Structures are given as C-alpha cells and as structure tokens.
Amino acid sequence: MTPVTTLQQSTGTARPVARRHRTRTAPVDARYPYWFYLLPAVVYGVFFLVPTVVSFYYAFTRWDLFTAHWVGLENFRTFFQEQSLVRGLTNTLIYAAITSGLKVVLGMALAVLLTSKIIARGYLRSVLFFPTLVSTIGIGITFTVLMNPEKGLINNMLSHAGVTGPAWLVDPSWALYSVAFVDVWKGVGLATVIYIAGLVSIPQEYYEAARVDGASSWTVFRHIMLPLARPATATVVLLSLIGGLRSFDLIWTMTGGGPGFTSDVIASVVYKQYQAGFYGLSTAGNVVLFVVVAIIAVPLSWFLNRKEVQA
C-alpha cells in the first residue's frame, strides 16, 4: 500500500493514487562497445578481485610474508577457539547495531528539523555536517581528553550538576558504548544529509493534500515522510552498518581495544595478530569479517530495497 493510499484511509478522503513501481536492474547499455569496459574491468580485477582471491588463499596458510605453508582450516579453528577473538566478534556486532540504529533514528529526526522553517537552517546543517569532515584520529584524541575520568570536561560538567560521571574509557562496562557514542556524533551528520536529500525530493502535492485533509503532523510523518524516505533509510542503514562492522581507527585511538579485551572488535584483534606476526591467522580473521559483512549486508540490502517506492 502506498503512502498516499494509506493517508486516504486515515483521513477518509479520496485522492489521486500514486503508483508503486518495482526497481529492476537495468541491462548494460548496448550503445558502448565492449572495449569501452576493458580499462575499468582491468582496474577492478587487479585492485579488487585478485587481492580478494589471494586473501582467501593466505587464510588457509601459515605465512611469514615470504613463504607460505598450507594448513587447511587450522587458522579458522584457532580463530574461533581464541576467547579474545570471539569477544571481538561479539563486540563488532554490538557496536555495529548501536551505531547504525542511532544514526538512523537521530539522522531522520534531525533531517525533519532541518527541513522545517527554522532560523539559520543552512548554518545549522553545516555545523551538523562538520564532524564528518574532521579526521577520525583527531576526534578520537580529542574525546579521549574530554572523557578523562578525573580531568575531562564532560565529568567536570556533570559534577557541577551533582552527577558523578563514569570512567568512560577505563570502565569495562562503559568503554565500548563510549566509543560508539563518539562514532554516532561523528557520523550522524552524513546520515542527516542523506535523509534531507530524501525528504526534499518528496513532491509537495502530498503535503498539500494532507493539509487539506486535516492530517496531523504525526500522520504526515508516518504515512508520507517515513515511507517515501525509504530509499534514504536503506542507504543510511547499509552505510552505517557496514561502517560499524569494519570500524577500527576510532576504537584503536580511544581505547586500543581495552581495558582488557572489552572494546576489542574484529578489526582491532586482527591488527594485534598482524603485530604479533600471525599473518595467516590475521588473514583468516579478515575473511571471517568479510563473510559476516556479506551475510548481514546482502540480505538486508535486498529487504530494504524490495519495496522501494517512487512518487
């Protein structure tokens, strides 16, 4: 059921019915000769396909950068027997779910606010997007100082309000969530921009019809904004989820995976294994991460795009 027909039912007034179209993969444009695709095909093969295949091969070997010995599934058995590696996999899923979910909810809410008739709307959009442009390492170092349990600005402000702040990056029960909060703060600007693009593309006729029908703001949001912004939602969910699954630089800068292994994710564990010289085991970890991302992202992409709505 389309958003407009749903609105018709909710308001009890007949309105023109928007048609739903299913998007299908378009065939390759036959106007271009085959040689036109040769260069991008070579680039794709050399820089993406070959390294992927080679990585899969080295995941089944014990190698030292110069020689490699085939060991079969031993690296994968070791990976899943290591408690720190399994903890890293669990933290990766938790981190991705938290950051992705918050970016979707906050991004949508901020997009609705920043597409409304408020003062200095353009300036506020720029301020919100600014953290996206800043270096992740720089943000990590800055928030490490701000979250210092004794001298940090955040706990000092909380103490003035009579609240004792936690040891954000030192307490095992807070470390992973503290980094996730910083990740959301940095990335919500991009999610908001994507949602703004989705909301401003909705035809004004739908809003005018809703106003004539006397629809409330919640009805307009639920039956017009939310369904017609579905392509933007799919983009934000996929980008933030994949980014969360492969996150490394912010976590490594702020906690180094600690305290202990409480904020370790797969990428940081793999990096530690590389530092220790276990290249085969590290490559197996990368393959596991690749498979996890593919298992989650591919079905999710299909699910989110199968009911894409065109106004």
Image: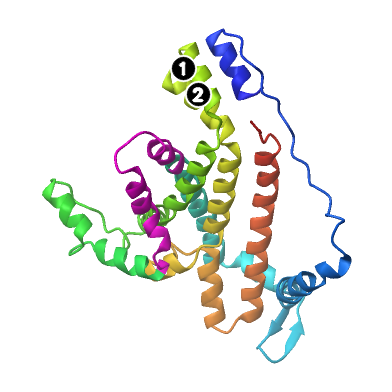
Residue at image mark 1: 211
Amino acid type at image mark 1? Arg
Position of 199 with respect to 168 (left or right) is right
Position of 179 with respect to 44 (left or right) is left
Whether residue 280 is situated above or below residue 225 in the rendered picture:
below
Mark 2–mark 1 Cα distance, whole angstroms, equals 6 Å
Residue at position x 51%, y 47% from top? 194
Q: Check the picture and name the quadrant holding the N terminus.
A: top right
User: What color scheme is it?
Assistant: rainbow
Closest to the observer: 18 or 48?
18
Residue at image mark 2: 207
Q: How many marks?
A: 2
Q: Which residues are magenta?
A: 107-136
Residue at position x 50%, y 20% from top? 208
Amino acid type at image mark 2? Tyr
Q: Check the picture and name the quadrant holding the C terminus.
A: top right
In the rendered image, residue 234 lying in the magenta stretch gets the answer: no
Q: Indicate the position of residue 286 as horizontal and vertical percent values.
A: 63, 69
Secondary structure at numbered mark 1? helix
Residue at position x 79%, y 70% from top? 41
Whether residue 67 is situated above or below residue 127 in the rendered picture:
below
